[in-house]
Amino acid sequence: MSNTINHQEVLHCLALQQLPGVGIISARLLYDVFSNATDVFSRRDELVHYTQPAQRRLIKQLDCPEAFRRAEQELAFAQKNGIDAICIGDRRYPSRLRECPDAPLVLFFKGNTNLNALRIVSLVGTRNATDYGRQLCNDFIRDLKTLFPEVLIVSGLAYGIDIAAHRAALEHQLPTVGVLAHGLDRIYPAIHRKTAIEMLEQGGLLTEYMTGTNPDRQNFVQRNRIVAGMADATIVVESAGKGGALITAGLATDYHRDCFAFPGRVGDPFSLGCNALVRDNKAALILSAEDFVKAMSWDISLTHKQAPQAIQRQLFLDLSPEEEALVAALRPHRDGLQINLLVVEADIPINRASALLFELEMKGVVKALAGGVYKVV
């Protein structure tokens, strides 16, 4: 995995994602054969040996000059406008999102923040936010800033709770990223343009969509998977009985991420969704930033004061090279490291890392915390 990926690989990733009749999941399946989009095109004759019969029709779609023409056009726009085109093999790509099977092969980002921050939280909710919901956003982010000054706040730049979360993050000097349902050649809704510009200096704007893409309804639903997938946890602040926030909460659960909801008064139309999530055990109830931090076991200094277990020095001598790589990656992080970041630092596939971490737990070398976080004992 490289710090940055060469132009040809980004071009091939983008072209692969644009092939007619090849969706995001199918494009990812082809990419995963070689873990390299350039090889997908140059070694297409070999794909027949690695794909299922039902997938072999996809190989025929690789001959598409228009996909490359459009990809070249988009990369030229990105370069001209200071936009980073980040493909899935790049270390800058959100590592948590990379583990999702429907992650896009290329993301476009304009901003100045780390998409692999140690702690990332998504706040979502209704577009018809009440004063109660907006105040919850502000109070939560203000208090979270006090506890963890570098947490990254993610939302969708939409009306209501989304924009309230972004503005609260800006006010309290936390980085914040807006995930868009269109290309970076526009801002929708236009009324949020001023906030979006401020976010470029304290966070940024992220999208999978190319220029010329309209902010259609289905795009908002699709972008929700990025909001959920790139974060450690999703928090629903206010939501009606149906809506995009509940879709995002469901995606977070599907991705095995933590999901939380603030309760509302019984009968309030924009608290129905939050109350139902809690009632149906689809989200944990929180009342404050302190509740959230304790549920995530982020407040290590307060919740893990017991003396560390004595570890025999010989345990470290018996570690395999892969186990040593995981321990070496964890050692600098006293509060622990989320598994999606850990696998990037150790350069070990997540399915292999999970088995190794279990073995290290059994040996008493590492300890598993809530939220998929591990630390050296």
Image (cartoon, grey):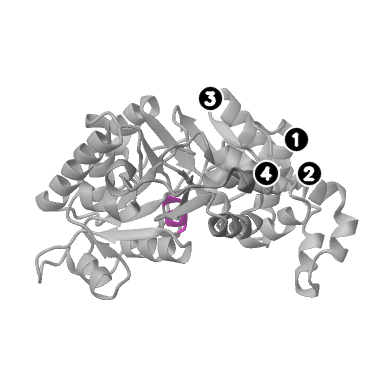
Q: Quadrant of the N terminus?
A: top right
Give yes or no for contact between labels 3 and 2 (Cβ–Cβ under 8 Å): no
First along the sequence among labels 2 and 1: 1
Against 248, is 328 above or below? above
Residue range of the region highlighted in magenta in the rendering: 222-227
At horizontal 59% and vertical 43% (from top left) the residue drawn is 313
Say what amino acid the circle numbered 4 marks.
Leu
Q: Which mark is residue 82?
A: 3
Residue 87 included in the magenta stretch of the image:
no
Q: Quadrant of residue 244?
A: bottom left
First along the sequence among labels 1 and 3: 1
Give yes or no for contact between labels 2 and 1 (Cβ–Cβ under 8 Å): yes
Disc count in the image? 4
Depth check, mark 4 against mark 1: the one in front is 4
Say what amino acid the circle numbered 3 marks.
Gly
Secondary structure at badge 4 equals helix
Answer left or right for 143 relative to 350.
left
The Cα atoms of the two marked residues, 4 and 1, are separated by: 43 Å
First along the sequence among labels 4 and 1: 1
Against 171, is 233 above or below? below
Depth check, mark 3 against mark 2: the one in front is 2
First along the sequence among labels 4 and 3: 3
Nearer-the-camera pick, 193 or 267: 267
Answer left or right for 25 relative to 305.
right
